[in-house]
Amino acid sequence: MIKNFKWLLLVSLTFMACNSDDDAVTVVDSSDGLPLTSGSANFSKYVALGNSLTSGFSDGALFKKGQEGAYTNIMAQQFKLVGGGEFKIPYTNDNIGGLLFGGQPNIAFGPRLYFNTTVSPTHPSSTVDPVSGTPTTEVMNPAVAAAGPYNNTGVPGAKSFHLLSPTYGAPAGLANGTANPYYVRFAPNGTTSVLAYAMSQTPTFFSLWIGNNDVLGYATTGGDGTNPITPASGAAGVGFDGTYAALVTTLTSGGAKGVVANIPYVTSIPFFKTVPYNPLTASAIGKGNAAQGLALISALNTQLYGPLKQALTAFGAGSRINLLSTTAANPLLIKDESLPNLSAQLTAAFTPTLGAQTAAFYGNVFGQARQATKTDLVLLTTQSAIGTAPTAENSGIGMAPPAPLNNFGITYPLQDKYVLIPTEVAELEVATNAFNATIKSIAESKGLAFVDANAIMKQIDQGGISANSFTMASTFVTGGTFSLDGVHPSPRGYAFIANKFIEAINAKYGSNLKGVNVGNYPVLYPAVLP
């Protein structure tokens, strides 16, 4: 069977529709050509609140060049042209990315990614790889906090309610997950919330883009329940509506004006649209050897798919499984927890031929199994799991299954965390709609500039948006909008976002700030940055 699907990019791109300029929406420069003015806004003390997007996180890491290219920093440079003040950023130490905890690297906070186009006998195709080098950015560095306060208070990983937590920057909370290392690094102490930190600077203008992680965490874990969606309603610090109201009420309490943005559907980003639901061609199953793959398909149809199809058909669920094709690309085998569990029925059906113990095992494994369809969204990170052997930790049954059930997505169902099924996609949409209704309502009631990021992302995903003669599309690697983690923007994507925020500010406050030329910003960062 397949031992490693390290990279499915070439296969993935084959199954993706290309976005063309013919269907693009054109961005109009909001500057009127007259002398720049701030309008009714005062940009002298600008603070930015939010998550990884606010901080400039890109390519799976936070690093200096990415922070420089954050949409918030780009905006701040335009604000300076009309009286804006210094925009101080808690810069990391290098362009490698990653963090040190007490001098030790943490695998969960590794180096940034780059597109490795080197081709050799041992590296036959382009891959996305971590850059070489060891991170030098230490979380436990009091000098960083002492050099504050910082205008950019964006914290990668932050959810809405985290901005209200007084212990989000407490080092002692790192062990139990109540604190965030990115905030610990620049927080003034372990008792000041992000919101309080921002307000301590007496802002005259703010940007707030928060709530993405309140749904994204659920989505990037495949909806397996380990990272739940924030409740839409509830008190501040619990539900999104109460939390968001508290944030904006506090930020505007001193008369500051600001700009807020809503939340795009997470399913429109490359992380959920790059790996196809049906990547299993004969050549892929045969690890590049089509003849070997055809032989494996024949064996699987006889030994696994055929018996499963027959048993499931007897229980009125034959549509869950079809025989593998020798000519077309085949869908992945997945677990769908929304299906009726037929474990007992399959166990009874297989007992005469497999024996009670083995039949019970098969029944447990395939009771909610089915082949994926185009309505299922395979996570970008799942590409490295397809064809590998399940372990006791990720099999869902507490043990590593034996051969021949030792190939994820082919002979063993990909578990919940690897795929978003339609019911989970629907949950995400309902939550996002509720969050966005709250954001728009509060923005209107407080007289704030509003960026409809959800509508913008839909355009990017469904044809692209033309800006400065470039098309901003959502295609992974080549679309120009997203970085190599499939979630966060590329340098050009951040510049585009900055322009959309500036457009909203101009429209609300009568300023005529000019956006930047997105063509001056690269699509991808190189392997080596100064």
Image (cartoon, rainbow, N blue to C red):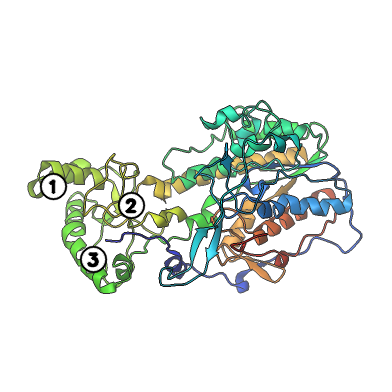
Residue 237: quadrant of the picture: top right
The quadrant holding residue 157 is top right
Q: Circle 3 is placed at which residue position? A: 297
* Amino acid at circle 2: Ile
- Mark 1 or mark 3: whose residue is earlier in sequence: 3
Give the x, y percent position of residue 59: 57, 55
Q: Could you say whether the residue bearing mark 1 is in a helix, strand or loop?
A: helix
Q: CA distance from mark 2 to mark 3?
A: 17 Å
Instruction: Rate crowding at label 1 as few (under 14), some (14 to 19) or many (20 or more) other CA atoms within 10 Å.
Output: many
Task: Look at mark 2 in the image and give the residue it sits on.
Answer: 334
Secondary structure beneath dot 2 equals: strand
Q: Quadrant of residue 337?
A: top left
Residue at the spot of label 1: 349
Residue at 13 percent across and 41 percent down: it is: 357
Do the numbered discs 2 and 3 sit on residues whose CB atoms are within 8 Å? no
Which numbered disc flags the more N-terminal residue, 2 or 1? 2
- In space, the residues marked 1 and 3 are separated at their CA atoms by 23 Å
Real-space Cα separation, disc 2 to disc 1, in angstroms: 21 Å
Q: Amino acid at mark 3?
A: Ile
Which disc number belongs to residue 101? none
Q: Who comes first in sequence, dot 2 or dot 3? A: 3
Dot 3 surroundings within 10 Å: few (below 14), some, or many (20 or more)?
A: many
Neighbourhood count class around disc 2 (C-alpha, 10 Å): few under 14, some 14–19, many 20 upward: many
User: In terms of depth relative to the viewer, which is nearer, 79 or 92?
Assistant: 92
Between marks 2 and 1 in the image, the one whose residue lies nearer the viewer: 2
Q: How far across and how far down the image is residue 497, in percent?
A: 69, 55
